[in-house]
Amino acid sequence: MKSSVLSFFTQNQILTALLIIGIGWIIIEIRGVLIALFVSYILMAAIAPYSEALKRAKAPSALAVIIPYFVAVIFLILILVSLVPFLVSQVQVLLSRFPSYLNSDVRVLGVPLGAIKLDEIATKEFSNIGQNAIAFTSQILGGIISAISIFAVSFYLLLYRNTVRENFVSLFSKSSQNKVRKITLLIEERLGGWLRGQLVLSGFIGVITWVVLTILGIEFALPLAVIAGLLEIVPTIGPIIAAIPAIIVALNISFPMAIVVGVAYFLIQLLENNILVPRIMQRAVGLNPIVIIIGIIIGGKLLGIAGALLAIPFISLLVVVYRKI
């Protein structure tokens, strides 16, 4: 009798282990689809409050969903049409000059080059970009298709938001459904708040960086500002990484100018950490910076850039579920 019981539990454990391994394998195989769905859900959560506001204003349900997406798409098109051509030309010039900047900056700092020619090394590395132009173009096209797909999925998630939520809630027992419903609503609020806050922070940092660099007379202020805005999503180390190319460009003018640029980036970071983040992001995310950095490292290790970028909202989701269970 005892051996049969042990055999039963052993069989169950083996089946459970195989099931977990199978689920893990499936998740790994379709991780790209899961990431796209997660991004679509975050986008839906960010737009949902505007849709609800339109519904409260007596707008038809379909229009209440269409209008926010239409406004977002028009805004993106205006930005792309007005900024991208100039930005691309600036980036091309910056990449072509960057090797000579490195060589010049090393001389300004008084570091002996010896037999090493930084401009030759950097030129060789940057030439790989041109050699991989076809692959890069295909990646861009793939990214555009993915972005359109994400917009489409998020649109339908918002259009059938209540239906999708109730179908998910119905998977749980009657006694748990109300609690699960509250958790899903709180997750939507947190993830949507994170994306809206992140867009505001990135936009503000990008604009103020562009203004400061333009006033200081630094070349390539726009691409450097775009880098600062994009890296704003990475706490603590993102602004440091963003400052490096700006300081390198400033060193080509003079060493004191490089110091001024470094101080300017530091002051912008102080403004963000002490005024903007507490007002905009703390309520939306409420995570310890150490937890965020560790999550970004783990996410980047597991899923690359996408994992690093989505680490913060995913951790926020886990924290909400953990605290409410």
Image: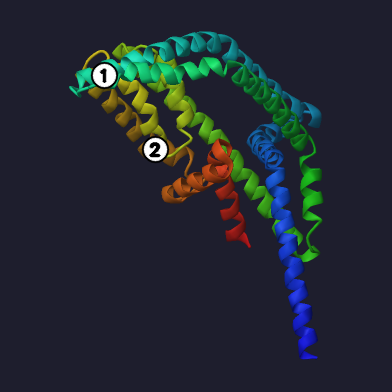
> Which of the numbered marks, if any, corresponds to residue 8?
none
> Can residue 284 be seen by looking at this rendering?
no
Q: How many other residues sit within 10 Å of disc 2, few (<14), some (14-19) or many (≥20)?
A: few
Q: Residue at x 71, y 51 (%)?
A: 25
Classify the position of the C terminus by image quarter. bottom right
Q: In which quarter of the image is residue 205?
A: top left
- Give the residue type at disc 1: Asp
Residue picked out by circle 1: 105
The residue shown at (65%, 20%) is: 138
Residue at x 77% of width, y 87% of height: 3
* Mark nearer the viewer, 1 or 2: 1
Q: In this view, does 158 lie above or below 104?
A: below
Colour mapping used in the image: rainbow
Q: Which amino acid does label 2 sit on?
A: Ile
Q: In which quarter of the image is residue 149?
A: top right
Q: How many labels does the image show?
A: 2
Against 213, residue 61 (above or below) is below
Quarter holding the N terminus is bottom right
**Which residue, as the protein is rendered here, is positioned at the far left?**
110
On the image, numbered disc 2 is attached to which residue?
237
